Image (cartoon, grey):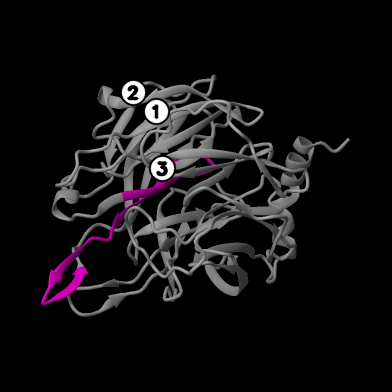
Amino acid sequence: MLNRRNFGLGAAAVGTAGFSRAAHAQNTIPFYASVGPRLNLYDLDAAAATLTARGGAVLPANVQYAWPHPSRKFLYVAASNGPPGSGPMGTAGADKNHYAVALQVGADGTLTEHGPRRLLPVRPLHITTDHDGSFLFIAYNIPSQVTVHRLMADGTIGQEVAQSSRPDFGIYAHQVRVTPGNRTLTLCSRGNDATPAKPEDPGHLEVFDFVDGQLSSLQSIAPHGNGLGFGPRHLDFHPSGRFVFVSLERENSLAVFGLNATGTLSIYPLFLKSALVDPDGKAKHPGQGVGPIHVHPNGRFVYQTNRGSGLTEMNGKKVSNGGENSVVVWAIDQKTGEPSLIQRAEAHGFELRTFTMDPSSRVLVAASTTPMPMPDGSTVSAGLSVYRVGSDGKLDFARKVDVDTGPGVQFWCGCLNMP
């Protein structure tokens, strides 16, 4: 009997290998990067560290985030023309709806829309599935919330699961992830910095039980007792299931929490370290923050981005204020989880909002969102920065593929093996 769980896990065993054999070019895999509503398809050759553009798909609105089904046969996309609360706005179409869309992945990586589009209440920010491919979880920043949809056995998106209660979703939800045991759901609620007009909004890490799609609050983590000075953006899990690595956007830092067998986290961080060359860089360069975070599959290294896209006025023009832009590489103590910074690889672009690694972990590709005018009158283009990943975890820059972001911001990139 082919139930939903067997479908997801059985197909996952052959998914990535199948794409490698059937890809458009020998020894390549599909890589995707969005520009506005278009999801561009590239052939990624990990051995050569090259990207070759090859078609794509157009969504009904700007791509916000995407996540693959565990089988790697479907890609779920959150799409909206709603502007982000901060950061680059970009071009937006006239469609004011917000969507969750399922795309079927062909043998060569091509994408076709699959099943009904699901309308969402507001702009979605992040999207993920559970490990069985039974549910789709979507996070929204304004107002902060999470919705749940059933995933059908054929990979289409089912109806939203009406919640019997409304848990606490914090302020400015930014990322939702299912813990490795598939028992709990984590939510990074970033909060907001203080402004002259309003005080700081606190940040939280929320943990929820989920049973048949129903969410219930299990744990709320707000260091310092109030969540002030705590701005979690994204997190990822160590393959041992013992540690959680949290990218603290507003503090430009990396925090490490313990992960319990119950799917809850340690109350306090085990370690907290700055990702910047200058710990006071945010004060000197407004707009400085850290970005996404991914753990190397071997658990020995963690990757995180520094994003400095602030502007200052010079000779009547807005130009870069000189913030840090890099991919930060941390070596991880396998016993304690302690991170040690071993590299800051130059970004070759500004605002690395997303990045991914190929299934063999030989190549890392980071997407910069928008062009940046420089004080010398030049402009650094948006693009895809390609790095070779060494056995020591360090990154060796291979090339940059320039991307025209006139049609829209390059908001997301990924491979089908993510996270």
State the residue position of label 2: 268
Label 3 sits on a secondary structure element that is loop
Q: Amino acid at mark 3?
A: Pro
Which three-letter amino acid code belongs to the residue tagged 1?
Answer: Phe
Classify 218 as above or below 254: above
Image position, residue 403 (x, y; %):
44, 74
For disc 1, the marked residue is 257
Residue at mark 1 to residue at mark 3: CA–CA distance:
27 Å
Q: Position of residue 354 (x, y in %)?
A: 44, 55
Residue 143's tag is 3
Disc 2 residue type?
Tyr
SS type, badge 1: strand
Residue 343 placement, left or right of 109: left
Residue range of the region highlighted in magenta in the rendering: 290-319
* Contact check, label 2 and label 1, Cβ < 8 Å: yes
Q: Residue at x 49, y 50 (%)?
A: 124
